Amino acid sequence: MPSHTILVLGNPAGRHFALLDRLPAGTRVVTGETEEAFSNVASDAQVVLLAGDHGALLRSLWPRLTQLQWVHCMWAGLEAMLFPELVKSTVVLTNGRGVFARNLGEFALAGMLHFAKDIPRMKAQQASERWESFEVEELHGRTLGIVGYGAIGRATAVRARTFGMSVLALRRHPGKCTDDPLVDRVYPPEQLNALLAASDYVLAAAPLTSETRGLIGEAAFAAMRPNTVLINVGRGPVVVEEQLVRALQERRIRGAVLDVFDQEPLPAGHPLWRLDNVLLSPHTADHTATWLQEAMEMFLENYRRFASGLPLANVADKQAGY
């Protein structure tokens, strides 16, 4: 295998970077979070691993990355790093799409069960030592609508099916779902409101692009049933947060399960903190003990492909934004 220079844009103290020791002998790895860290090596680099919120750093290094062939982002979201020079270049861009899908699928089901079984009521009665029987719901027979049927959507659909749920999917290219046994019906983007009106639970798992920003707003909430629960594990700005808060406060929808937000950390005093019909995660739904290791494993496998001249996995469409 040829030797390469890899720039790792991330905190050098990250324990998961120890896995880079598996790279072939002779591979040059430089890790840092400033331009100065790469001042003597940027012009030699063929590969950049983006391992943090360092899209701005990548752009500042760009004029010196004259030998760059491939950029890998450890996460799925690419919106913060798709600057024009990268988009127009021939540099291949890959991401961690699908690495955390299993964890996020489990979180989505946990959110559905939270509302179906009325866990908050159980905890409140336990705290006050009240023994009051009440009815709970089944997920069996309910309908899950998935907005953005990618890896996370499919992982959630697999789990929803085991509970006997029906699954509807919205995706940009509906034809890709023609033979999918997990999906009862697929909708094109222009039929979003029809999917929402037919769903008891709505999973937002779409990437953030110019087309999806603000996709779930006032018209979408008007289309939802009063018993609908919205689950967002994709990108915060896909949902119009102010309008979501209003729909929740006015009980026009049943509730929300949120792992992502417009601003993170969620500011103190934000109304979402106080709403009793919201289950809120501080963007940790996929943070298992091994999540960073799994993301690194994805990079290492793709590097093996790169060094061997094989097609890379998870090649992004830079124009589409995911």
Image (cartoon, grey):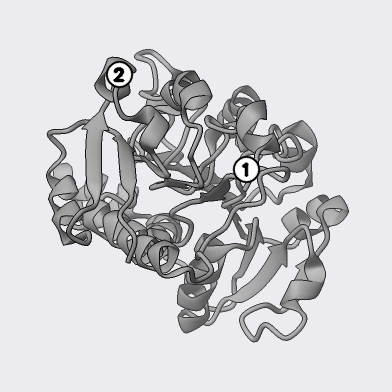
Q: Nearer the viewer, residue 211 or 85?
A: 85
- The N terminus: image quadrant: bottom left
| Residue highlighted by disc 1 | 253
Neighbour tally class for label 2: few under 14, some 14-19, many 20 plus, Cα within 10 Å: some
What is the x, y in percent for residue 3? 30, 55
| Residue occupying image coordinates x 53% and y 82% | 164
Instruction: Name the side, left or right, on which 307 lies relative to 233.
Output: left
- Up the image or down, 94 lies above or below 256; here it is below
Q: Which mark is residue 34?
A: 2
Seen at 52% across and 22% down, the residue is 63
Residue toward you, 166 or 190: 190
- On screen, residue 167 above or below 307: below
Most extreme residue toward the right, as rendered?
190
Q: Are marks 2 and 1 in contact (CB under 8 Å)?
A: no
**Which residue type does callout 1 highlight?**
Ile
Look at the picture and state if 12 lies above or below 227: above
